Amino acid sequence: QETQAMTTAQAPSLTVMQDGTPIFTSYSKWLYPLFELEAYLTDHAFEPAYLTLQDKIIGKAAALLIHRLGFRTVQAGILSRLGEAVLQRHAMTYTSEQLVERIHCQMEELLAAVEDPEEAYQLVKARAGQ
């Protein structure tokens, strides 16, 4: 019965691993998992540079927020070229299952000309009503 529950259970949208062990998971949509992660990191003494972040979809907004949080190693399901450019510019280690021209997200358009992680954070936060 456990096996059936595991196969029907939704996969997390974001997972943070420490030495292969999940220490944080989120099932939320859009960019909300990154806000949840920010709150988690505030309350826990983990150093993001030594953790691995796994995200289903990483576009430019997510890439900027992930960099802002201090992560250096990222695994993406789907990665947009704009997101990849951010990861490359900040010399982050990353892998992706699929690289796409762009993801269909308004934030990808809104942040097209934004390169500053703090500016991106404020724009996303405002859009999220945080």
Image (cartoon, rainbow, N blue to C red):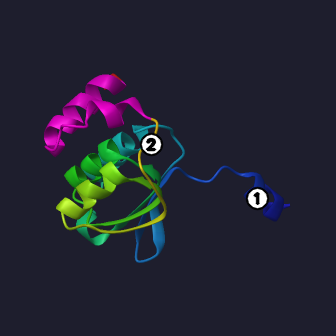
Which quadrant, please, contains the C terminus? Answer: top left
**Dot 2: what SS?**
loop
Q: Which residues are magenta?
A: 105-128
- State the residue at coordinates (41%, 37%): 32
Residue 71: percent from the left, percent from the top? 27, 61
Residue 34: percent from the left, percent from the top? 36, 45
Distance from the alpha carbon under mark 1 to that under mark 2: 27 Å
Of 18 and 78, the residue lying toward us? 78
Q: Residue 118 has which mark? A: none
Q: For the residue marked with disc 2, what is the amino acid?
A: Ile
Residue 52: percent from the left, percent from the top? 37, 67
Is 99 placed left or right of 119 in the picture? right
Name the chief secondary structure element in magenta: helix
Q: For the residue marked with disc 1, what is the amino acid?
A: Thr
State the residue position of label 1.
7
- State the residue at coordinates (42%, 34%): 105
**Dot 1: what SS?**
helix
Residue 95: percent from the left, percent from the top? 41, 69
In which image quadrant can residue 108 be found?
top left
Q: Tell me, yes or no, whether the highlighted magenta stretch contains residue 115.
A: yes
- State the residue at coordinates (32%, 57%): 84
Dot in front, 1 or 2:
2
**Residue located farthest toward the bottom when viewing the structure as drawn:** 19
State the residue position of label 2.
103
